[in-house]
Structures are given as structure tokens and as C-alpha cells.
Image (cartoon, rainbow, N blue to C red):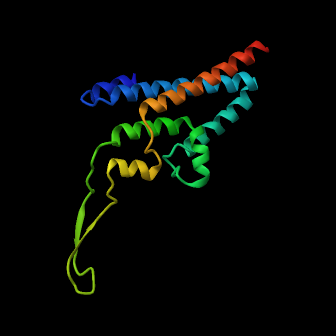
């Protein structure tokens, strides 16, 4: 329902259908992983603990909290479903867009010659520069959706194998 409301509010943007599809695929992949964990562990207490840890891991390595271009995060980030969803969404909305700085200020007597200088109040990046900075320069919505579908398919295949042994 929330995705439908979001789509109706911003219907002028072409990326919304991609966003809704990405949201659905992310939810499906997460549900498949939850089903796999519950099926393998078969105890609610253990499954809850593992899933809380897994969700924390996915949040930490999504690219939102820490930069995924650093050494340990570069290896662990591809395992996070949220990283794929966040990267695909950022790429959809930032690629091929130019943004301006938040503002500029004139600082009086900034240097020793007492001349005025104009300084920016924030960092100034284009969409591509920001995507490269955070490590999402190669991400697409379609690639993220396909990756999460493959993860969900593998999880469901392992579930089917586990169910055949019960």
C-alpha cells in the first residue's frame, strides 16, 4: 500500500515503477531468507537471534551507515540485501543529474591580504561523483533486482532440499 501511495504522489518520475519492483523483490528475498533460517534452525529463539543478527549485518553493510569502499566492507557488502536495494535506488535517482551546492558565503578577510573570499557551505558533487564516492557507480535497478531474485531462488532451493530431508 505504501508503495502505491508513493507511486501516485510522484507519477511524473519514470523511476517509480523500478522503485516499486525493487521494493517487492527486496521483500521477497528477505522473506525467503527468513523462511530458510526458520526451516533450518526449527527453534523460534535461535531463529530470532540469527535473524536479528542478520538484519543488523544488512543494515551495517548497506552503504548507508558506512562507506562500502573501505577494505572489510567491500568484501561483506555484497551479502547485504539492503545494499543492493539502496544502491539501485541511489543509482536510479542520482545518475545523470546535476546538483548544485547548498549555499555559499562571503567571508570577509579570509586571507592575510584581507580580501573577501567566497566559500561553499557544503560538499558539491554531481550524481555520478557521489555514486562513485559511496561505491555505487556500477549499480542499476535491474541489476539489483536480478541479484536479489537469484538470492531468493537459492534460498528457496535450499528450503526445498531441507524439506525433502524432514
Quick one: 150 or 7, which is closer to the camera?
150
On screen, residue 59 versus residue 165, left or right, reads left
Q: Residue at x 38, y 28 (%)?
A: 18
Q: Find the residue positioned furthest to the bottom.
A: 112
Q: Is residue 151 depicted above or below 59 in this figure?
A: above
Locate residue 138, reporting x and y percent.
45, 42
Quick one: 4 or 148, which is closer to the camera?
148
Locate residue 109, reporting x and y percent.
23, 81
Q: Residue at x 42, y 32 (%)?
A: 141
Locate residue 15, reporting x and y percent.
33, 31
On screen, residue 107 versus residue 44, left or right, reads left
Circle count: 0
Which quarter of the figure is the C terminus placed in? top right
Q: Residue at x 48, y 32 (%)?
A: 144
Which quarter of the figure is the N terminus placed in? top left
Locate residue 88, reporting x and y percent.
43, 36
Q: Find the residue positioned furthest to the front.
A: 138
Q: Find the residue positioned furthest to the right.
A: 165
Residue 91 found in image quarter: top left
Q: Is residue 113 depicted above or below 139 in this figure?
A: below
Residue 8 found in image quarter: top left
Amino acid at each position: 500500500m505504501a508503495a502505491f501511495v508513493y507511486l501516485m504522489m510522484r507519477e511524473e518520475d519514470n523511476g517509480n515503477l523500478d522503485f516499486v519492483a525493487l521494493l517487492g523483490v527486496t521483500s521477497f528475498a528477505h522473506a525467503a531468507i527468513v523462511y530458510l533460517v526458520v526451516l533450518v534452525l526449527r527453534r523460534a529463539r535461535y531463529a530470532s537471534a540469527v535473524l536479528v543478527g542478520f538484519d543488523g549485518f544488512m543494515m551495517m553493510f548497506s552503504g548507508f551507515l558506512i562507506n562500502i569502499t573501505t577494505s572489510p566492507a567491500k568484501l561483506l557488502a555484497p551479502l547485504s540485501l539492503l545494499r543492493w536495494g539502496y544502491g539501485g535506488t541511489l543509482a536510479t535517482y542520482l545518475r545523470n543529474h546535476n546538483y548544485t551546492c547548498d549555499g555559499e558565503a562571503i567571508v570577509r578577510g579570509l586571507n592575510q591580504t584581507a580580501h573577501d573570499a567566497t566559500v561553499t557551505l557544503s560538499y558539491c558533487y554531481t550524481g555520478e561523483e557521489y555514486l562513485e564516492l559511496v561505491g555505487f557507480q556500477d549499480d542499476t535497478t535491474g541489476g539489483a533486482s536480478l541479484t536479489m531474485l537469484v538470492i531468493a531462488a537459492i534460498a528457496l532451493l535450499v528450503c526445498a532440499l531441507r524439506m525433502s530431508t524432514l
